[in-house]
C-alpha cells in the first residue's frame, strides 16, 4: 500500500519501522517541526523524523495542515491510507478524506476511555486495572472514530515509560495486521457509555500531593516516570521520586497521624501529610505512607534513598 505516516515521539517509531518491514511503501513522513533542545539549544529533529531519515523516507514538518497549500501537497501524495501515531497536530477534514482508505490512528487506550492527549498517564493515575491499544478509523471528533482492532494488557505496577514501550510495540503489531487486510477488520462504532478524556498533563500535577493516600501517591510516581517526574521540595531544591513502595500494615510505623510534629499543619494539610517519619525516608501521606526507592536531585543521576540521604540529609520530622 501507498502510506503516509504521521508521528512525532519515540512511541511512534516502532509503528513506522513495522510498516516498512511489512513491505508497504511509505511515500512521506509527517512530523512536528524541529525544536530547540539541549544546552546549546540546537534545532533537534523529532524521533520519527530521525528514523525516517535513516530509512530514506522524505520528511515533511509543516507547522499546520489548515492552509490550502499544505492540504494540496498532502493530497498529491495519492496515498491509500495515512497512519497516525501520536502526531500532535489536528487533522482537518480535507486531510482526513484525502487518502483512499482514510486515516488510521494508533491510540494508546481502550476507547472510549481516555480519549485525548495523555491516555497512558491518566490510566495509571486513575488506578485502571488494564489498558491497551485501539486501531481507530479517524473522523473529525476527538478520538471518536470507530475501532477496527484492539488489544489489552494489565497495568499492574508498570511505569508510564514501561507501558509506553509495551503499547508502542502492541500498536505496531496491530497496525500491520489491519493494513494486511483492512476489509477483514470492519470499523465498529465506539460505545456511547464510558467516555473519559485524558487531558494534557499540567506541570502542577507533577508535584507530589501528600494529602492523597499512599496508593495515589505511588500511582502519581509511576505515571510521571521517566518524565517529567513526580517531585517534592527540600531545602529549596526539587527532588524527583522515580520509584517508591507503599508500606503495608506492619511494614512501617503505625498511627501515622500521631507521628507528625505538632506544628505540621496549615491550609489543606492534615497532621502527617508529607512528614518524614524515620531515617529510611518513610513519608506520611493522607492515609498510609510511602518509602521512595529511587530519587533524583536536579542535575544529578538517579540514586537509591540510602545514597541520597548520605549526601542530602532529610531528618525525621521534616515536613516536605
Image (cartoon, grey):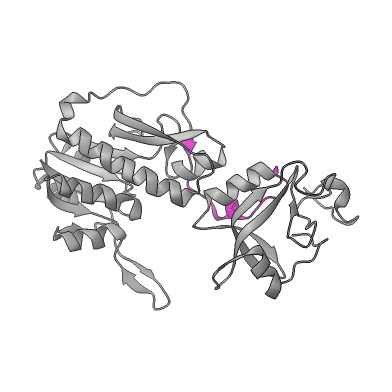
* Vertical side of 218 occupied by 138: above or below: above
Residue 103 at what x, y percent from top left? 22, 37
Task: Give the x, y percent position of residue 241.
Answer: 61, 58
The region drawn magenta spans: 197-213
Q: Main secondary structure of the magenta part?
A: loop
**x, y (%) of residue 268?**
77, 47
Give yes or no for residue 169 being in the magenta stretch. no
Q: Nearer the viewer, residue 306 or 240?
A: 306
Residue 130: x %, y % from top left: 47, 34
The residue sitting at 18% across, 36% down in the picture is: 179
Q: Quadrant of residue 283?
A: bottom right
Q: Residue furthest right?
A: 262
Magenta-colored stretch includes residue 198: yes
- Is the residue 259 above or below the residue 111 in the image? below
Residue at 85% over, 55% down: 264
Q: Is residue 255 left or right of residue 92?
A: right
Residue at 40% across / 21% down in the picture? 191
Amino acid at each position: 500500500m501507498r502510506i503516509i505516516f504521521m508521528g512525532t515521539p519515540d512511541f511512534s517509531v516502532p509503528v513506522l519501522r513495522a510498516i516498512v518491514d511489512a513491505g508497504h511503501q511509505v511515500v512521506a513522513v509527517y512530523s512536528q517541526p524541529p525544536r530547540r533542545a539541549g544546552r546549546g539549544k540546537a534545532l533537534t529533529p523529532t524521533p520519527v523524523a530521525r528514523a525516517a531519515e535513516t530509512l530514506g523516507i522524505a520528511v515533511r514538518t509543516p507547522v499546520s495542515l489548515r492552509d490550502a497549500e499544505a492540504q494540496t501537497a498532502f493530497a498529491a501524495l495519492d496515498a491509500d491510507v495515512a497512519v497516525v501515531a501520536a502526531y500532535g497536530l489536528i487533522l482537518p477534514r480535507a486531510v482526513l478524506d484525502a487518502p483512499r482508505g482514510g486515516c488510521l490512528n494508533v491510540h494508546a487506550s481502550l476507547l472510549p476511555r481516555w480519549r485525548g492527549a495523555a491516555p497512558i498517564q491518566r490510566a495509571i493515575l486513575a488506578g485502571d486495572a488494564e489498558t491497551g491499544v485501539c486501531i481507530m478509523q479517524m473522523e473529525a471528533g476527538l478520538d471518536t472514530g470507530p475501532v477496527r482492532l484492539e488489544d489489552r494488557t494489565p497495568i499492574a505496577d508498570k511505569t508510564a515509560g514501561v507501558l509506553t514501550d509495551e503499547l508502542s510495540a502492541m500498536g505496531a503489531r496491530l497496525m500491520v495486521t489491519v493494513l494486511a487486510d483492512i476489509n477483514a477488520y470492519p470499523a465498529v462504532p465506539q460505545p456511547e457509555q464510558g467516555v473519559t478524556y485524558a487531558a494534557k498533563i499540567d506541570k502542577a500535577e507533577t508535584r507530589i500531593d501528600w494529602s492523597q493516600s499512599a496508593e495515589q501517591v505511588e500511582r502519581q510516581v509511576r505515571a510521571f516516570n521517566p518524565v517529567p517526574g513526580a517531585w517534592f521540595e527540600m531545602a529549596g531544591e526539587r527532588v524527583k521520586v522515580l520509584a517508591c513502595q507503599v508500606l503495608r500494615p506492619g511494614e512501617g510505623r503505625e498511627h501515622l497521624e500521631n507521628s507528625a510534629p505538632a506544628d505540621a499543619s496549615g491550609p489543606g494539610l492534615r497532621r502527617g501529610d508529607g512528614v518524614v517519619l524515620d531515617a529510611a525516608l518513610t513519608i506520611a501521606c493522607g492515609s498510609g505512607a510511602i518509602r521512595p526507592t529511587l530519587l533524583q536531585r536536579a542535575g544529578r543521576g538517579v540514586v537509591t534513598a540510602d545514597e541520597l540521604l548520605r549526601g542530602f540529609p532529610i531528618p525525621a520530622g521534616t515536613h516536605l
